[in-house]
Image (cartoon, rainbow, N blue to C red):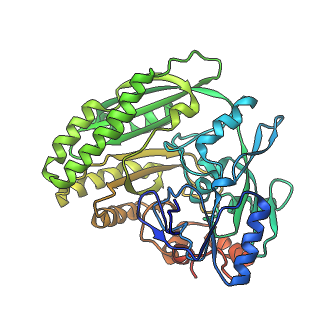
Amino acid sequence: MTRPGGTWQNWGRSASVRPVRVEFPRTVEAVQRSVRAAAASGLKVKAIGAGHSFTGIAVAPGALLDLTDLTGLVDVDRERSRVTLLAGTRLHQVPVLLAPYGLAMENLGDIDRQSISGAISTGTHGTGARFGGIAAQVVGATLVTASGELLVVNETENAELLPAVALGLGALGILVHVTLQCVPAFVLHAVEHPEPLQDVLDGLDHRVAESDHFEFYWFPHTDRAMTKYNTRLPESAPRHPLSPVGKWFDDTVVGSGLHQVACTVAKAVPATIPSINRLSVKVWGDREFSDASTRVFATSRSVRFREMEYALPAENVRPAFDAFRTLVDERGWRISFPVEVRFAAADDRWLSTAHGRASGYIAVHRYWREDPTEYFEAVEQIMLSFDGRPHWGKMHTLDAAILRDRYPRFDDFVSLRERLDPERMFTNAYLDRVLGA
């Protein structure tokens, strides 16, 4: 978010910058003018959405384009169930835009505050072994290039560029339009409850294969896992949503209020963390309900944190998780935030963490007032040993020399970047690190 005085900082408070100038374009033409003006002034230019990346991927020391006002529906292809959105449209705004057409996004993550352009550019994903990340739903895009011109990419124009542009890290240009392949609106039946961690791990492959959307959370220092199973149903299926009071209690009182208190206490007195985690397992996530997909996928997250997430070949999730648990025990750490495990289908996006392989994700978090460095870097070494790829929008230490070997199309992406942005108009320190200067 951009604060008075021109200082921008991300949601996790892990990145901030005071840009030379800040602009709020409302139209595609305004974005083009901003890019041309930045070039004339010798400034780098970056677009930002909701600031939900934990890395410096959106840091803009030169010209910062805040896309808050570049939102809304551009076009609907009813016959093919495709919609084109302005790039700054937030994910939580999309359901209302799609509702009149009986459409929904195929899959979502568990946070919906991001802009559509930010979500696809960083590889945001949900869970479900048969479903790809949000970038895999992209069938077209338009971006403003370094020359200020428009580059249209879809199945009939520049089709060969789609796997790069759909997940471009903001390195190829400024996205202004995003076209999504949608599906008919649907209902999700959600079952959330605690189970013995060992049972979950022993039956992990079966649970992932037999569920539309499966994930689990593990509170360190406990022997329980919080499991979430979401089953897809037709839009006409009966709904049994959470009561307003029940949802308020689960999401606001427990999920936000009590968790905030727990994190504050845990930071002050780390010895209390195992007891707090055991209590959390008892009060969190034992419920069953059904509702429109978007109301089930996303949850409210008001407790601020920092996150690192690695994508692994799906078959490596169990051994990597076991090694992680051993690490926590050996180091004697006290970890208050749960560990999240999710899954996704393989896709063809060049820089997707799921490129060419069915993937599982292990995400670790720390309360934002705690230093995550020692914890994250030790966990990172385990994930790398199991062929991990870091989420582009979450904290990691890798650079281009290491990442090149983990992505078969890495050099193709770098070559395209050289072609579209030879003067590096859209770079910053993070992109220089992960793609090379």
Residue depicted at 72% across the width and 80% down the height: 39
Residue depicted at 21% across the width and 54% down the height: 267
x, y percentage for residue 226? Answer: 34, 35
State left or right for residue 309 relative to residue 177. Answer: left
Q: How many labels does the image show?
A: 0
Residue 193, picture quadrant: top left
Would you say residue 423 is visible in this rendering? yes
Residue furthest toward the top?
238
Residue furthest toward the front?
4
Would you say residue 146 is visible in this rendering? no
Residue depicted at 59% across the width and 50% down the height: 346
x, y percentage for residue 104? Answer: 66, 35
Residue 99, picture quadrant: top right
Residue furthest toward the right?
156
Q: Where 427 falls versus 124 (above or below)? A: below
Residue 256, picture quadrant: top left
Quadrant location of the C terminus? Answer: bottom right
Residue depicted at 26% across the width and 48% down the height: 263
User: Looking at this view, is 365 or 163 the one in front?
Assistant: 365
User: Looking at this view, is 19 or 325 the one in front?
Assistant: 19
User: Looking at this view, is 419 or 304 the one in front?
Assistant: 304
State left or right for residue 215 relative to residue 87. Answer: left
x, y percentage for residue 277? Answer: 23, 41
x, y percentage for residue 197? Answer: 29, 37
